[in-house]
Image (cartoon, helix red, strand yellow):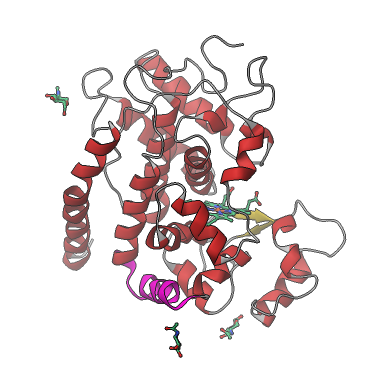
Amino acid sequence: MSTATTSKIMLLMAFMAAALSSVSMASGLRYNFYNTSCPGAEDKVRSVVQSLISNDATMGAAFVRLFFHDCFVRGCDASILLDPSTSNPNTEKQAIALRGYDAVNKIKAALESICPGVVSCADILAFAARDSTTASGGFTFGMPSGRRDGLVSVFGEVFQHMPSPSSQLGDLLKSFDAKGLDAVDLVALSGAHSFGQTSCNFVKPRLYPADPTMNATFATALRSVCPQQGGGSILVNNNRVSQDPNKLSNAFYQNVASRQVLFTSDQTLTSRNDTAAMVADNAARPIAWMARFTGAMLKMGRIDVLTGANGEVRKVCFATNSGT
Ligand code: HEM
Ligand SMILES: *[C@@H]1O[C@H](CO)[C@@H](O)[C@H](O)[C@H]1NC(C)=O
Ligand SMILES: *[C@@H]1O[C@H](CO)[C@@H](O)[C@H](O)[C@H]1NC(C)=O
Ligand SMILES: *[C@@H]1O[C@H](CO)[C@@H](O)[C@H](O)[C@H]1NC(C)=O
């Protein structure tokens, strides 16, 4: 690594350390929560995540998205992971198809083998998202922990809280504001659409008929992949422009500028001057984007967390300990 890059990354870490001591105090989370109860916890998560990503480079995106969907519905409480049961007959995971549930079970099993019953599934999602950022994005940060797992997961809450890919900027800002996240956070986190995959279903509304805010060349290429009839589950890379579709980077913002992004919710980020300026700055200054992405991930990671004696630490991530 060059000296310039090293010093930029050290600057970033110093900035984050200063910004974040207040974050952890306000939420009841703290850095290194498992330092005595399970000192190897964060290393174990990192090594399993790294091996899952080296076996399948698309997994980083799956972990980052799981964290977003967990935190936006009922807070970061692993409610996204619960399977249906008597007490939770219709759960969040039935509402939107996400990837990575088996992978989360693998991480949990690895932790249970070193410290049974200690590390919550909510913290596993947070650590896995951080470690995916490192593996797929090349930058890292401390992730406060001490989240506990919820007992409740409700299908019907998903669409109340999750923004839609057809949302315009005003609605996106409202749904982020409801979680304590601002326009800077929205724009920074949308950079996660630099990696991972999308099914044609979510793209077709902008292809048939053609959305004039999409680059016409880009739209023609997408129409050849996503047919008008059928093919809704065909996968396309979120980043169809860069060489590596599994790299988390600020390339997203250049794609927004050239109108080569998949969702209305991506393209609408330039519809107001202030957010358009944020897009331009994130495109021009990768290290600044990394700092903003980090800050926003940490803010997201403290949404409505359960701490102390609230909730529980699940034995398995897909069921509550009572199992009913
Ligand atoms: C701003 C509002 C957002 C909307 C409307 C939105 C919508 C979507 C949709 C529709 C997909 C495709 C899903 C599929 O085909 O199964 C997707 C994928 C993805 N989203 Fe978002 N998203 C938003 C914000 C975020 C945020 C904040 C993050 C994380 C920080 C994120 C991370 C991802 C990732 C990584 C993928 C690829 C997942 C994979 O490869 O499986 N998104 N998003
Ligand atoms: C663990 O962290 C707590 C709180 O930060 C600290 O008081 C304690 O000394 C740490 N223990 C070890 C073994 O590092
Ligand atoms: C549309 O995309 C092409 C590459 O496919 C690019 O060269 C062009 O600059 C884009 N157009 C606009 C208006 O950004
Ligand atoms: C937004 O930016 C455009 C182009 O720079 C400018 O003409 C317009 O006055 C700005 N609008 C507002 C509300 O600042």
Q: Residue at x 63, y 58 (%)?
A: 165
- 275 left or right, relative to 243: left
- 268 left or right, relative to 192: right
Q: Position of residue 20 (x, y in %)?
A: 22, 46
Q: Residue at x 47, y 15 (%)?
A: 315
- Against 31, residue 159 (above or below) is below
Query: In what quadrant of the picture does the N terminus appear?
Result: bottom left
Q: Position of residue 103 (x, y in %)?
A: 53, 32
Residue 150 makes an appearance in the image: yes
Query: In what quadrant of the picture does the C terminus appear?
Result: top right
As for residue 124 lying within the magenta part, the answer is: no
Q: Position of residue 11 (x, y in %)?
A: 17, 59
Q: Residue at x 59, y 67 (%)?
A: 240
Q: Position of residue 230 (x, y in %)?
A: 85, 56
Q: Residue at x 39, y 55 (%)?
A: 137
Q: Which residues are magenta?
A: 272-287
- Against 323, residue 193 (above or below) is below
